[in-house]
């Protein structure tokens, strides 16, 4: 029986040929391919400035630093996410303030944001979890009323949108990830999206030891550049991203029509869910379902088993009931574009049987 993988990076022959060309050129660090990748990615985010870096975490960190976030500031973040969202805040010296989510969408709850705002609050770090945009219309109204910055964590949300407006264009900055399991990959890598040219310039310097021109360092910076090797892969992946996303959506629709006995993902009207993950809620004995699927060679994943605020690295004693409930109930199933109709049928059959046995 063939194993059905939860994630499967698609690296084709064109990607491989593009990498070989870069290797043969002898110019493998940040160079013309990175610039080309940035320009092509900009077309996905309304022509905003794009700055390629070495990871999605670096993208979040440099976005926050360039926006002036630092010691003494508070940044509101959801606790139901990967730790990198909060890590990037903490690494600036600012304090992450954890808030709850909506159970239907798994995204940050607007009322929880409102209650968490203090005089020290400087920004909201919004996550478009699993590929579903957060409620950016209400979040933007709230941010404007309190003069707060918005940084979008769009690591899982390539091509997601609200009323045809793409994620990455709602906030003051946005961070995308190209980790191998994401909807497109560069091996490792990230992209920062901003609308302010002065912020874009600062980020370019921050990623490159504080300089735009070689040996003309203007600020203290980092080494967070993307290589031309990674960018060459990214350019090829971009050409296929739309068709891959459409396949993810079709796969998700099939799963939602046929899975029974648990809560399937909900997508608000006017929203495009990119389905980085297809995540259901199983009200009891979730781990028993995980084991049942494992026995029939179907991978699944729990994203995330522990709220960030309960991790040893943060250890905050706060009550976030929807977050804690979700950690015990969520289960992500294969939805990637490499799945065949036979694969999808197997996933549906096996999870329905596993849930029926609970």
Image: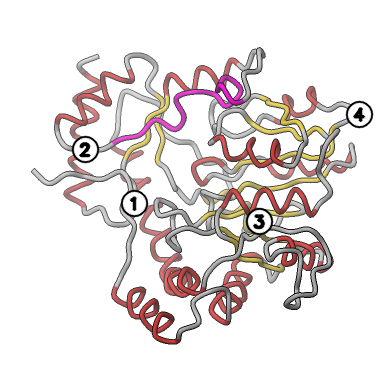
Q: Horizontal and vertical percent for residue 80?
A: 56, 29
Earlier in the chain: of badge 1 and badge 2, it is 2
Image point (43%, 19%), residue name: 328
Query: Tell me, what colour scheme is on the image?
Result: secondary structure
Mark 2 lies on residue: 298
Mark toward the viewer: 1 or 4 = 4
Looking at the image, residue 300 lies above or below residue 215: above
Looking at the image, residue 215 lies above or below residue 299: below
Image point (59%, 34%), residue name: 107
Mark 4: secondary structure: loop
Q: Which residues are magenta?
A: 300-313
Mark 4 lies on residue: 119
Image point (64%, 13%), residue name: 319
As drawn, is 245 to the left or to the right of 137? left
* Residue at the front extreme of this rendering: 215
Image quarter where the N terminus lies is top left
Image quadrant in which you'd find residue 354:
top left
Q: Magenta segment, principal secondary structure?
A: loop
Mark toward the viewer: 4 or 3 = 4
Label 4 neighbour load within 10 Å: few <14, some 14-19, many 20+:
few
Mark 3 lies on residue: 168
Image quadrant in which you'd find residue 87:
top right
Q: Are marks 4 and 3 in contact (CB under 8 Å)?
A: no
Looking at the image, residue 296 lies above or below residue 289: below
Tell whether position 304 is magenta. Answer: yes
Tell whether position 131 is magenta. Answer: no
């Amino acid at each position: 029986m063939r194993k059905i993988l939860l994630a499967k990076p698609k690296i084709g022959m064109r990607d491989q040929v593009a990498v070989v060309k870069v290797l043969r050129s002898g110019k493998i660090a940040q160079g013309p391919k990175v610039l080309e990748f940035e320009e092509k990615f900009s077309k996905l985010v309304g022509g905003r400035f794009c700055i390629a870096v070495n990871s999605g975490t670096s993208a979040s960190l440099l976005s926050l630093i360039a926006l002036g976030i630092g010691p003494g500031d508070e940044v509101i973040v959801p606790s139901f996410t990967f730790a990198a969202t909060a890590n990037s805040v903490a690494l600036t010296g600012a304090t992450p303030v954890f808030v709850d989510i909506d159970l239907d969408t798994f995204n940050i709850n607007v009322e929880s944001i409102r209650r968490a705002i203090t005089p020290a609050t400087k920004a909201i770090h919004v996550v478009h979890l699993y590929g579903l945009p957060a409620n950016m219309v209400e979040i933007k109204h709230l941010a404007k009323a309190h003069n707060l910055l918005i940084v979008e964590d769009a690591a899982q949300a390539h091509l997601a949108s609200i009323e045809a407006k793409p994620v990455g264009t709602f906030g003051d900055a946005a961070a995308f990830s190209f980790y191998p399991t994401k909807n497109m990959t560069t091996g490792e890598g990230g992209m920062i999206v901003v609308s302010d040219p002065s912020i874009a310039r600062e980020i370019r310097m921050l990623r490159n030891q504080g300089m735009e021109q070689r040996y003309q360092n203007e600020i203290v910076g980092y080494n967070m550049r993307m290589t031309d090797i990674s960018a060459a892969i990214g350019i090829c992946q971009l050409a296929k991203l739309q068709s891959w996303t459409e396949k993810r959506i079709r796969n998700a629709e099939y799963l939602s029509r046929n899975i029974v006995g648990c809560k399937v993902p909900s997508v608000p009207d006017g929203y495009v869910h990119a389905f980085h993950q297809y995540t259901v809620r199983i009200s009891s004995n979730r781990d028993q379902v995980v084991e049942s699927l494992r026995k029939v060679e179907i991978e699944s994943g729990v994203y995330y088993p522990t709220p960030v605020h309960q991790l040893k690295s943060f250890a905050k004693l706060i009550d976030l009931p929807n977050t804690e409930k979700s950690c015990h109930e969520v289960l992500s199933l294969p939805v990637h574009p490499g799945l065949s109709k036979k694969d999808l049928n197997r996933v549906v059959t096996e999870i329905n049987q596993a849930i029926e046995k609970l």
